[in-house]
Image: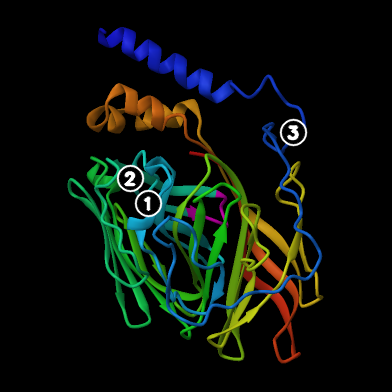
């Protein structure tokens, strides 16, 4: 097939994939950007028993089924990938860090979603409402060697570009260099994420589909210091006012998913207070993603119900737990909106064309990702395990709603 015909077929398929759902809007609502989306149902308000895992155990048995589901204060569960029986295209692995302060927010990610491996960095100017940097480099699936645990080194390399994440004691050190071919816009730097205390939230979530699951380790109790250099501009981050969260994930996922995720952090009386919230996928009866981490200790939450307006993501988001232990309002100051558009697809075309076959490219571009993520200030209160109440006033954090097909 000649190159012109290949390009035409490629273009036609992108347009078809982007708009194939527009003809069927049954049960969908139109959001702020004109996108038709299916609302994420609220979790039940019934209080469920949160099963705490206290001993080290394998995640999967020899038949590929979960040995256990629940949550742990440390990543005690061993990810024995060799026992996964699901289709290899369902296996997703990533290590992602969101960081934020009153001026900037961003993220560093290394991932493999079975069709493609990626390394990326993002940086956004919150005050001036603009994107500073957003670069994603791609490699073939399987090229990135992901550790089975949360503490071994992780490396992404492509040409001169690299992301190396080292773990030393309570610190995660991300060193990165992105050469996009323009010397004036080379991105480099080091960010150090320091975990306050040993406890965080390790959660195992089963799906209704056989042999599908998600094992995640959320660490919201991170302070961040370091720098990002872009060309001749330098952006510095101080661990007194910059906070972060680790999203470490290993799982076998169904093709279509949706989720809500939120986190926040700040110092209260010299001790780091943080929290993680989430729902929208899988069976959460034995463990929700909701928890407070204060002074290095987890205070587990049950269900937290979200209220937000998809017609205006910048309106306040309201969060209330089913047992009156968590009540917060998030007032957004910045909206990160991301959709896979035709323009973005063509920006990736050169990378795809260099390392993938035409058939593989068509599979990759069938992926859909629709994200609305707000950064802002949380106010409200929380109740700790001992019944003490902590008032929160303008604490930094974020919340996101994500729709994913992969």
Q: Is residue 6 above or below residue 220?
A: above
The stretch in magenta equals 124-129
Given residues 171 and 50, the one toward you in this image is 50
Q: Earlier in the sequence, mark 3 or mark 2?
A: 3
State the predominant SS element of the stretch in magenta.
loop
> Residue at the location (56% across, 60% down)?
205
Regarding residue 352, the answer to whether it shows in the image is yes
Going by the picture, which residue comes out furthest to the front?
A: 63
Q: CA distance from mark 1 to mark 2?
A: 6 Å
Going by the picture, which residue comes out furthest to the left?
A: 159
Tell me the residue that label 2 is attached to. Answer: 117
Tell me where residue 403 sits by quadrant: top right
Crowding at dot 1, Cα within 10 Å, few <14 / some 14-19 / many 20+, comes out as many
Q: CA distance from mark 3 to mark 2?
A: 31 Å
Crowding at dot 3, Cα within 10 Å, few <14 / some 14-19 / many 20+, comes out as few
Q: Is residue 357 above or below residue 195?
A: above
Q: Is residue 245 above or below residue 54?
A: above
Q: Which of the numbered marks, if any, corresponds to residue 28?
A: 3
Could you say whether the residue bearing mark 1 is in a helix, strand or loop? strand
Could you say whether the residue bearing mark 2 is in a helix, strand or loop? strand
Tell me the residue that label 1 is attached to. Answer: 111
Regarding residue 400, the answer to whether it shows in the image is no
Q: CA distance from mark 1 to mark 3?
A: 30 Å
Q: Is residue 302 above or below residue 135?
A: below
The percent position of residue 296, horizontal first and vertical second, equals 53, 86
The percent position of residue 260, horizontal first and vertical second, equals 64, 54
């Amino acid at each position: 097939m000649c190159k012109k015909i290949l390009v035409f077929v490629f273009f036609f398929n992108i347009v078809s994939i982007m708009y194939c759902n527009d003809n069927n809007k049954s049960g969908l609502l139109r959001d702020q950007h004109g996108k038709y989306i299916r609302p994420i149902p609220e979790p039940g308000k019934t209080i469920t028993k949160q099963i705490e895992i206290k001993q080290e155990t394998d995640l999967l048995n020899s038949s590929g089924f979960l040995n256990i589901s629940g949550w742990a204060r440390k990543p005690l569960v061993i990810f024995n990938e060799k026992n996964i029986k699901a289709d290899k295209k369902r296996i997703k692995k990533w290590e992602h860090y969101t960081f934020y302060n009153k001026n900037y927010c961003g993220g560093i990610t290394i991932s493999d979603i079975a069709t493609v491996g990626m390394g990326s960095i993002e940086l956004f100017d919150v005050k001036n409402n603009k994107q500073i940097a957003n670069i994603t480099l791609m490699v073939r699936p399987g090229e990135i060697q992901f550790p089975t645990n949360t503490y071994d080194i992780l490396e992404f390399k492509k040409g001169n570009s690299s992301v190396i994440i080292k773990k030393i004691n309570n610190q995660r050190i991300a060193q990165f260099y992105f050469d996009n071919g323009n010397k004036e816009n080379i991105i480099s730097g080091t960010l150090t994420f320091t975990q306050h205390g040993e406890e965080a939230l390790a959660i195992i979530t089963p799906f209704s589909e056989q042999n599908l699951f998600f094992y995640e380790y959320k660490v919201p109790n991170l302070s961040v210091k370091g720098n990002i250099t872009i060309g001749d501009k330098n952006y510095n981050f101080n661990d007194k006012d910059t906070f972060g969260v680790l999203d470490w994930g290993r799982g076998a996922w169904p093709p279509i998913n949706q989720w809500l995720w939120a986190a926040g952090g700040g110092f209260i009386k010299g001790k780091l207070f943080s929290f993680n919230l989430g729902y929208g996928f899988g069976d959460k009866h034995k463990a929700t993603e909701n928890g407070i981490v204060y002074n290095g200790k987890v205070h587990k939450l049950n269900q937290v119900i979200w209220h937000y307006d998809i017609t205006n993501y910048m309106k306040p988001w309201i969060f209330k737990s089913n047992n009156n232990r968590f009540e917060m309002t998030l007032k957004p100051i910045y909206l990160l909106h991301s959709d896979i558009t035709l323009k973005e697809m063509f920006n990736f075309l050169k990378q795809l064309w260099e390392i993938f076959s035409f058939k593989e490219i068509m599979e990759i571009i069938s992926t859909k990702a629709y994200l609305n993520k707000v950064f802002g200030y949380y106010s409200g209160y929380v109740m700790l395990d001992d019944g003490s109440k902590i008032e929160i006033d303008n604490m930094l954090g974020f919340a996101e709603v994500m729709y994913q097909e992969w």
